[in-house]
Amino acid sequence: MARKLFIAGNWKMNTSAAEAAALATDLVGRLGAEAKVDLAVCPPSVYLTTVRDVLKGSAIALGAQNAWYEDNGAYTGELSTAMLADVGCAYVIVGHSERRHILGETDAMINRKVLKVLAGGLKPILCVGELLEQRKADQTDDVVARQVKLGLKGVAPTDMARVTIAYEPVWAIGTGEVATPQQAQAVHAMIRDLLADLFGKTIADATRIQYGGSVKASNAGDLLACKDIDGALVGGASLKAAEFAGIVAAGAKL
Ligand code: PEP
Protein backbone atom coordinates (compact mmCIF):
# COMPACT_ATOMS: atom_id res chain seq x y z
CA MET A 1 0.00 0.00 0.00
CA ALA A 2 1.25 3.45 -0.84
CA ARG A 3 2.10 5.51 2.21
CA LYS A 4 2.31 9.28 1.88
CA LEU A 5 5.70 10.51 3.02
CA PHE A 6 5.73 12.49 6.25
CA ILE A 7 8.60 14.89 6.96
CA ALA A 8 8.78 16.71 10.27
CA GLY A 9 11.25 19.25 11.64
CA ASN A 10 12.29 19.11 15.27
CA TRP A 11 13.63 22.53 16.16
CA LYS A 12 14.61 21.40 19.68
CA MET A 13 15.77 24.27 21.94
CA ASN A 14 17.31 26.20 19.09
CA THR A 15 15.33 29.29 18.15
CA SER A 16 14.40 32.64 19.61
CA ALA A 17 10.85 33.89 19.08
CA ALA A 18 11.99 36.04 16.17
CA GLU A 19 13.95 33.18 14.60
CA ALA A 20 10.99 30.81 14.98
CA ALA A 21 8.66 33.28 13.26
CA ALA A 22 11.17 33.97 10.49
CA LEU A 23 11.85 30.27 9.89
CA ALA A 24 8.14 29.45 9.81
CA THR A 25 7.51 32.34 7.40
CA ASP A 26 10.29 31.16 5.10
CA LEU A 27 8.95 27.58 5.21
CA VAL A 28 5.42 28.68 4.40
CA GLY A 29 6.78 30.58 1.41
CA ARG A 30 8.61 27.52 0.13
CA LEU A 31 6.34 24.67 1.22
CA GLY A 32 3.01 26.15 2.21
CA ALA A 33 1.19 24.54 -0.73
CA GLU A 34 3.03 21.19 -0.65
CA ALA A 35 0.58 18.41 -1.46
CA LYS A 36 2.74 15.36 -2.14
CA VAL A 37 4.33 15.09 1.30
CA ASP A 38 2.80 15.59 4.76
CA LEU A 39 4.74 18.20 6.71
CA ALA A 40 5.05 19.34 10.31
CA VAL A 41 7.36 21.51 12.38
CA CYS A 42 7.89 21.19 16.12
CA PRO A 43 9.11 24.49 17.58
CA PRO A 44 10.03 25.13 21.22
CA SER A 45 6.77 25.02 23.17
CA VAL A 46 6.88 28.69 24.19
CA TYR A 47 6.71 29.64 20.53
CA LEU A 48 3.96 27.21 19.47
CA THR A 49 1.37 29.95 19.18
CA THR A 50 3.75 32.26 17.31
CA VAL A 51 4.49 29.54 14.77
CA ARG A 52 0.86 28.41 14.63
CA ASP A 53 -0.18 31.89 13.55
CA VAL A 54 2.40 31.89 10.75
CA LEU A 55 1.47 28.39 9.55
CA LYS A 56 -2.25 29.12 9.48
CA GLY A 57 -3.82 28.08 6.17
CA SER A 58 -0.64 26.38 4.95
CA ALA A 59 0.09 22.69 4.40
CA ILE A 60 2.53 22.64 7.32
CA ALA A 61 1.14 21.20 10.55
CA LEU A 62 2.22 22.12 14.05
CA GLY A 63 3.79 19.64 16.45
CA ALA A 64 5.09 19.67 20.01
CA GLN A 65 8.38 18.16 21.13
CA ASN A 66 6.97 16.52 24.25
CA ALA A 67 3.87 16.17 26.42
CA TRP A 68 3.04 14.94 29.90
CA TYR A 69 0.80 11.96 30.60
CA GLU A 70 -1.59 13.42 33.15
CA ASP A 71 -4.44 15.84 32.47
CA ASN A 72 -3.45 18.49 35.01
CA GLY A 73 -2.04 18.95 38.48
CA ALA A 74 1.26 19.46 40.23
CA TYR A 75 3.66 18.75 37.35
CA THR A 76 5.86 21.81 37.32
CA GLY A 77 7.15 22.66 33.89
CA GLU A 78 5.06 20.10 32.02
CA LEU A 79 2.37 20.53 29.37
CA SER A 80 -0.77 18.43 28.97
CA THR A 81 -2.05 17.14 25.66
CA ALA A 82 -5.16 19.31 26.11
CA MET A 83 -2.91 22.39 26.32
CA LEU A 84 -1.07 21.33 23.18
CA ALA A 85 -4.33 20.71 21.34
CA ASP A 86 -5.56 24.07 22.55
CA VAL A 87 -2.66 25.89 20.88
CA GLY A 88 -3.16 24.06 17.60
CA CYS A 89 -0.80 21.08 17.74
CA ALA A 90 -1.61 18.09 15.59
CA TYR A 91 1.50 16.03 16.40
CA VAL A 92 3.58 15.33 19.49
CA ILE A 93 7.08 13.86 19.44
CA VAL A 94 7.29 11.21 22.16
CA GLY A 95 10.35 9.43 23.48
CA HIS A 96 12.98 11.38 21.56
CA SER A 97 16.41 9.95 22.34
CA GLU A 98 17.42 13.19 24.06
CA ARG A 99 14.51 12.73 26.46
CA ARG A 100 15.31 9.05 26.94
CA HIS A 101 19.04 9.47 27.48
CA ILE A 102 19.48 12.97 28.91
CA LEU A 103 16.20 13.34 30.81
CA GLY A 104 15.78 9.71 31.85
CA GLU A 105 12.46 8.87 30.23
CA THR A 106 11.66 5.18 30.46
CA ASP A 107 9.69 3.00 28.06
CA ALA A 108 6.88 2.93 30.64
CA MET A 109 6.69 6.75 30.74
CA ILE A 110 6.87 6.94 26.98
CA ASN A 111 4.05 4.43 26.68
CA ARG A 112 1.87 6.50 29.00
CA LYS A 113 2.62 9.56 26.88
CA VAL A 114 1.73 7.76 23.63
CA LEU A 115 -1.58 6.65 25.12
CA LYS A 116 -2.32 10.12 26.47
CA VAL A 117 -1.48 11.83 23.18
CA LEU A 118 -3.85 9.46 21.39
CA ALA A 119 -6.57 9.92 24.02
CA GLY A 120 -6.20 13.66 23.52
CA GLY A 121 -6.95 13.31 19.82
CA LEU A 122 -3.38 14.12 18.75
CA LYS A 123 -0.86 12.13 16.72
CA PRO A 124 2.25 10.76 18.42
CA ILE A 125 5.58 10.43 16.67
CA LEU A 126 7.15 7.63 18.72
CA CYS A 127 10.95 7.78 18.52
CA VAL A 128 13.02 4.64 18.89
CA GLY A 129 16.67 3.86 18.25
CA GLU A 130 19.79 2.14 19.48
CA LEU A 131 22.95 3.57 21.00
CA LEU A 132 26.27 3.09 19.20
CA GLU A 133 27.45 0.46 21.69
CA GLN A 134 24.19 -1.45 21.22
CA ARG A 135 24.66 -1.46 17.44
CA LYS A 136 28.27 -2.60 17.86
CA ALA A 137 27.07 -5.39 20.14
CA ASP A 138 24.51 -6.51 17.54
CA GLN A 139 21.62 -5.53 19.78
CA THR A 140 19.93 -3.09 17.39
CA ASP A 141 16.90 -5.22 16.54
CA ASP A 142 16.36 -6.27 20.17
CA VAL A 143 16.59 -2.72 21.49
CA VAL A 144 14.39 -1.18 18.82
CA ALA A 145 11.81 -3.99 18.95
CA ARG A 146 11.56 -3.62 22.71
CA GLN A 147 11.09 0.16 22.45
CA VAL A 148 8.38 -0.27 19.81
CA LYS A 149 6.57 -3.01 21.73
CA LEU A 150 6.64 -1.20 25.07
CA GLY A 151 5.92 2.19 23.52
CA LEU A 152 2.80 0.90 21.77
CA LYS A 153 1.54 -1.30 24.61
CA GLY A 154 -2.23 -0.96 24.91
CA VAL A 155 -2.63 1.13 21.75
CA ALA A 156 -5.92 0.26 20.07
CA PRO A 157 -5.54 -0.98 16.50
CA THR A 158 -7.97 1.73 15.40
CA ASP A 159 -5.64 4.38 16.83
CA MET A 160 -2.63 3.16 14.87
CA ALA A 161 -3.71 5.31 11.91
CA ARG A 162 -2.58 8.31 13.99
CA VAL A 163 0.77 6.82 15.05
CA THR A 164 4.06 7.54 13.31
CA ILE A 165 7.21 5.73 14.37
CA ALA A 166 10.56 7.48 13.94
CA TYR A 167 13.58 5.19 13.79
CA GLU A 168 16.47 7.35 14.95
CA PRO A 169 19.75 5.57 15.62
CA VAL A 170 21.16 7.60 18.49
CA TRP A 171 24.66 7.56 17.01
CA ALA A 172 23.32 9.37 13.94
CA ILE A 173 21.47 12.17 15.72
CA GLY A 174 23.19 15.52 15.49
CA THR A 175 26.48 13.83 14.66
CA GLY A 176 26.58 14.25 10.90
CA GLU A 177 26.90 10.48 10.71
CA VAL A 178 23.93 9.10 8.81
CA ALA A 179 22.80 5.48 8.67
CA THR A 180 23.25 4.06 5.21
CA PRO A 181 20.00 3.49 3.34
CA GLN A 182 20.66 -0.26 3.74
CA GLN A 183 21.16 0.00 7.51
CA ALA A 184 18.05 2.12 7.92
CA GLN A 185 15.90 0.01 5.59
CA ALA A 186 16.82 -3.17 7.47
CA VAL A 187 15.61 -1.74 10.78
CA HIS A 188 12.49 -0.23 9.20
CA ALA A 189 11.59 -3.62 7.70
CA MET A 190 12.10 -5.24 11.10
CA ILE A 191 9.79 -2.66 12.70
CA ARG A 192 7.14 -3.25 10.05
CA ASP A 193 7.29 -7.02 10.59
CA LEU A 194 6.89 -6.42 14.30
CA LEU A 195 3.89 -4.14 13.68
CA ALA A 196 2.36 -6.94 11.60
CA ASP A 197 2.80 -9.32 14.56
CA LEU A 198 1.28 -6.78 16.94
CA PHE A 199 -1.53 -5.30 14.86
CA GLY A 200 -1.83 -7.33 11.64
CA LYS A 201 -0.46 -6.76 8.18
CA THR A 202 -2.99 -4.17 7.02
CA ILE A 203 -2.14 -1.83 9.87
CA ALA A 204 1.59 -2.53 9.55
CA ASP A 205 1.44 -1.67 5.85
CA ALA A 206 -0.36 1.59 6.58
CA THR A 207 1.88 2.81 9.42
CA ARG A 208 4.46 5.44 8.57
CA ILE A 209 8.00 4.86 9.79
CA GLN A 210 10.25 7.91 9.53
CA TYR A 211 14.03 7.81 9.57
CA GLY A 212 15.87 10.37 11.67
CA GLY A 213 19.58 11.04 12.11
CA SER A 214 21.54 13.68 10.20
CA VAL A 215 19.10 13.79 7.28
CA LYS A 216 19.87 16.61 4.88
CA ALA A 217 18.92 17.54 1.34
CA SER A 218 21.92 15.69 -0.09
CA ASN A 219 21.18 12.31 1.52
CA ALA A 220 17.36 12.43 1.77
CA GLY A 221 16.63 11.07 -1.70
CA ASP A 222 18.49 7.78 -1.17
CA LEU A 223 16.96 7.25 2.26
CA LEU A 224 13.40 8.13 1.26
CA ALA A 225 13.60 5.86 -1.78
CA CYS A 226 13.85 2.81 0.50
CA LYS A 227 10.76 0.65 0.56
CA ASP A 228 10.00 0.95 4.27
CA ILE A 229 11.20 4.51 4.89
CA ASP A 230 8.15 6.74 4.87
CA GLY A 231 9.58 10.11 5.72
CA ALA A 232 12.05 11.80 7.98
CA LEU A 233 12.31 13.42 11.38
CA VAL A 234 14.83 16.17 10.87
CA GLY A 235 16.76 18.04 13.55
CA GLY A 236 19.64 20.31 12.52
CA ALA A 237 18.68 20.60 8.85
CA SER A 238 15.14 21.67 9.78
CA LEU A 239 16.53 24.95 11.11
CA LYS A 240 17.50 26.06 7.61
CA ALA A 241 14.45 26.60 5.40
CA ALA A 242 16.31 25.92 2.14
CA GLU A 243 17.77 22.68 3.48
CA PHE A 244 14.43 21.47 4.87
CA ALA A 245 12.74 22.39 1.59
CA GLY A 246 15.45 20.42 -0.22
CA ILE A 247 14.62 17.33 1.85
CA VAL A 248 10.94 17.76 1.08
CA ALA A 249 11.70 18.22 -2.63
CA ALA A 250 13.73 14.99 -2.60
CA GLY A 251 10.69 13.19 -1.17
CA ALA A 252 8.17 14.89 -3.43
CA LYS A 253 9.91 13.76 -6.60
CA LEU A 254 9.94 10.06 -5.68
C1 PEP B 1 16.43 14.53 15.75
O1 PEP B 1 16.75 15.21 16.69
O2 PEP B 1 15.33 13.95 15.74
C2 PEP B 1 17.38 14.43 14.65
C3 PEP B 1 17.20 13.50 13.76
O3 PEP B 1 18.41 15.34 14.63
P1 PEP B 1 19.48 15.55 13.42
O4 PEP B 1 18.68 15.60 12.16
O5 PEP B 1 20.13 16.85 13.74
O6 PEP B 1 20.41 14.40 13.47
Image (cartoon, helix red, strand yellow):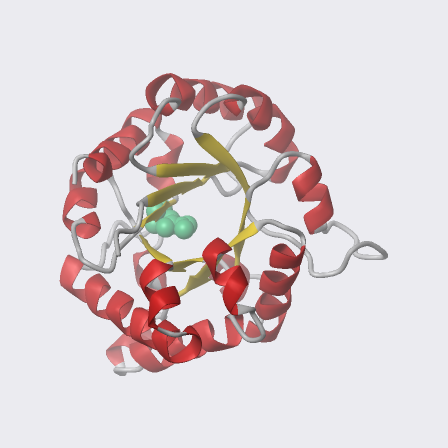
Total labels drawn? 0
Could you tell me which residue is drawn at 66 percent across and 58 percent down? 119
Could you tell me which residue is drawn at 28 percent across and 31 percent down? 243
In the rendered structure, the answer to whether residue 56 lies left or right of residue 34 reads: right
The residue closer to the viewer here, 109 or 205, is 205
Q: Where residue 156 sits: x, y (%)? A: 56, 69
Q: Where residue 63 sits: x, y (%)? A: 53, 41
Residue 10: name its quadrant. top left
| Picture quarter with the C terminus | top left
Q: Is residue 173 above or below residue 54?
A: below
| Picture quarter with the N terminus | bottom left
In the rendered structure, the answer to whether residue 209 lies left or right of residue 117 reads: left
Q: Is residue 204 above or below residue 178?
A: below
Residue 116: name its quadrant. bottom right
The answer to whether one can see residue 246 in this image is yes
Q: Where residue 200 sits: x, y (%)? A: 38, 74
The residue closer to the viewer here, 78 or 116, is 116
Could you tell me which residue is drawn at 63 percent across and 50 percent down? 121
Q: Where residue 155 sits: x, y (%)? A: 56, 69
